[in-house]
């Protein structure tokens, strides 16, 4: 069965970087891309970006351009999202999800990783 | 960017009720709309794509409709496990965007 398992919670200081991992299993990794979605406490879902596991192509939300990096490692079937220059409003649960149908729908999700940015 | 607006932001309903949630796009998106369900502390669950196609395993009491800018999600007979927050998401163009969510609460 398809599973996405994310890395554990992180606490970071403002200005630092965080890297969240998402290990996939149960399917051929390079068949589908990944998207990352975040959710601030008590708020809605925010799409952060998408990466193709086949080509490495990416597409990011404009507000995060320059601060977000998405990568994949096909040897370990793992996707990564790194966010730099962290601010307090980056505090959120970060989800990875498998992106299907051209990368625009998300059928399987990780369990979420809480990233807290606090001095 | 395409803005997605959901209404209402919350609705109180009883088991067995019919519930309808509306999602409006700021510009036409054809049928490129998805719906997700999220329960507290859990990841979202993929319900519907292409405005009206149920994802495998989703109960038939869920249905979606619409085209262009106006879309609806209907739960025909609300069950206890359906109390959750529902999000629409436009799949027409990057950047992909979500609606603000509709919380379905117990009356």
Image (spheres, coloured by chain):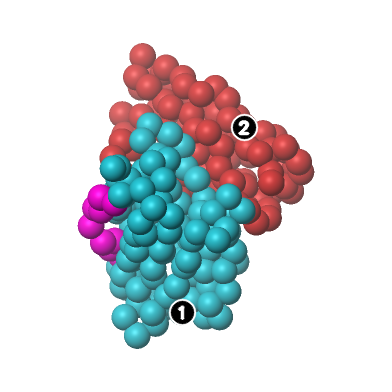
Chain colours: A cyan, B red
Quarter of the image with the C terminus of chain B in it: top left
Residue at x 29%, y 51% (from the top left corner): A12
Residue at x 58%, y 74% (from the top left corner): A57
Q: Which residues are magenta?
A: A2-12
Residue under disc 2 on the same chain as residue under disc 1: no
Verify whether residue A5 appears in magenta: yes
Secondary structure of the residue carrying tag 2 is strand
Q: Which mark is residue A30?
A: 1
Vertical side of A117 occupied by B10: above or below:
above
**Which residue is denoted by mark 2 in the rendering?**
B5
Vertical side of A2 occupied by B11: above or below:
above
Majority SS type along the magenta span: strand
Neighbor class of circle 2 (other Cα within 10 Å; few <14, some 14-19, many 20+) is many
Residue B85 located left or right of residue A66: left
Verify whether residue A77 appears in magenta: no
Rendered location of residue A9, percent (x, y): 24, 53
Residue at x 35%, y 56% (from the top left corner): A16
Say if residue B53 shows up in the picture.
no
The chain letter for the residue carrying disc 1 is A
The chain letter for the residue carrying disc 2 is B
Residue at x 38%, y 79% (from the top left corner): A73
Vertical side of A59 occupied by B72: above or below:
above
């Amino acid at each position: 069965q398809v599973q996405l398992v994310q890395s554990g919670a992180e606490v970071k200081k403002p200005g630092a970087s965080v890297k969240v991992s998402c290990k996939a299993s149960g399917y051929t990794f390079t068949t589908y891309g990944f998207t990352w979605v975040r959710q601030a406490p008590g708020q809605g879902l925010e799409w952060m970006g998408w990466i193709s596991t086949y080509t490495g192509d990416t597409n990011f939300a404009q507000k995060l351009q320059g601060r977000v990096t998405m990568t994949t490692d096909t040897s370990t079937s793992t996707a990564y999202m790194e966010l730099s220059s962290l601010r307090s409003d980056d505090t959120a649960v970060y989800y990875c999800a498998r992106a299907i149908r051209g990368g625009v729908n998300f059928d399987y999700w990780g369990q979420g990783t809480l990233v807290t940015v606090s001095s | 960017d395409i803005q997605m607006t959901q209404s209402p932001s919350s609705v109180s309903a009883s088991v067995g009720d019919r519930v309808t949630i509306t999602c409006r796009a700021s510009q036409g998106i054809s049928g490129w709309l998805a719906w997700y369900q999220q329960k507290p502390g859990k990841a979202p669950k993929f319900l519907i794509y292409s405005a009206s196609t149920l994802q495998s395993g989703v109960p038939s009491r869920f249905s979606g409709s619409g085209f262009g800018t106006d879309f609806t999600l209907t739960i025909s007979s609300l069950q206890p496990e359906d109390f959750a927050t529902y999000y629409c998401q436009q799949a027409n163009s990057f950047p992909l965007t979500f609606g603000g969510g509709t919380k379905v609460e117990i009356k």
